Image (cartoon, helix red, strand yellow):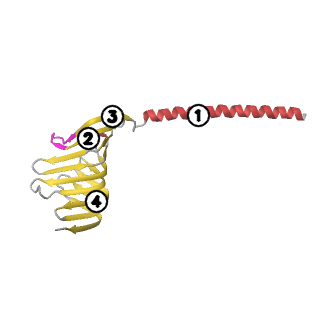
Amino acid sequence: MTRLSADRISGGLTLLLMAVLAIVAWLLAELTLSSRQEQVIGAPDTPKASLTAVKLERSDPTGQGLYTIRSAMGVQAQSGAILLRAPELERTVPGQTLTRITAGQADIAERQSSVALTGGVRATHTRLSEPSSPIALTTEALTISPAEERASSALPVRIEQGGRILTGTGLEMDLKTGQYKVLAAARVEIRP
């Protein structure tokens, strides 16, 4: 074989290899593009609807209201989850207690099985028999389990009642009775 023939064969193989690589790259790009579109369209977090003047109510099996959440705006995802901006949650036990909670946002799971409040959560729990001594709570995140009427947090909390200030990390609270437990590093300060 002459050098000229070897160069032609080598050049032809190089062109063939480059053509095959170009086709493979094109096929991979097409597959990647189509799979990305399918993921975006079918993603469960894709907004389904924009919401304004939101009012969500949850009641127990007897029809008695457990809580109401209000917000000026939010979005509902394909999964049924709802994300609200600047929500206000209110829980009333007629003749006994009133709980009001505000936050920067609320992430409400499908069928309202849990409500995750974040962004400067502030809660006030008032026993109607003692309206002058409410319990005021602040934390960065609070998770509410409506079916159990409980709230919890793993973050630092501050609870004020009368002249007593309780700080610590972690919280468990019964929303019906207002009883709470700070889980770690609890510290009490009493002010006159």
Q: How far is the residue under mark 3 from the one under mark 2?
A: 12 Å
Q: Amino acid at mark 1?
A: Ala
Residue under circle 3?
50
Horizontal side of residue 135 vs 34, given as left or right: left
Residue 131 found in image quarter: bottom left
Pointer 4 local density, CA inside 10 Å: few below 14, some 14–19, many at least 20? many
Sequence-first tag of 3 and 2: 3
**Residue 163: x, y in percent?**
17, 65
Q: Residue at x 29, y 63 (%)?
A: 168
In the picture of the structure, the residue carrying the numbered disc 4 is: 157
Q: Which residue is mark 2?
A: 71
Give the residue drawn at x 39%, y 39%. Answer: 45
Given the image, on which type of amino acid does mark 4 rest? Answer: Val
- SS under mark 3: strand
* Sequence-first tag of 1 and 2: 1
Report how far apart the C-alphas of labels 3 and 1 lie in the structure. 33 Å
- Left or right: residue 191 compared with residue 47: left
Q: Nearer the viewer, mark 4 or mark 1?
A: 4
At label 2, the amino acid type is Ser
| Measured Cα–Cα span from mark 4 to mark 2 | 24 Å
Between the residue at mark 3 and the residue at mark 4, the CA separation in whole angstroms equals 32 Å
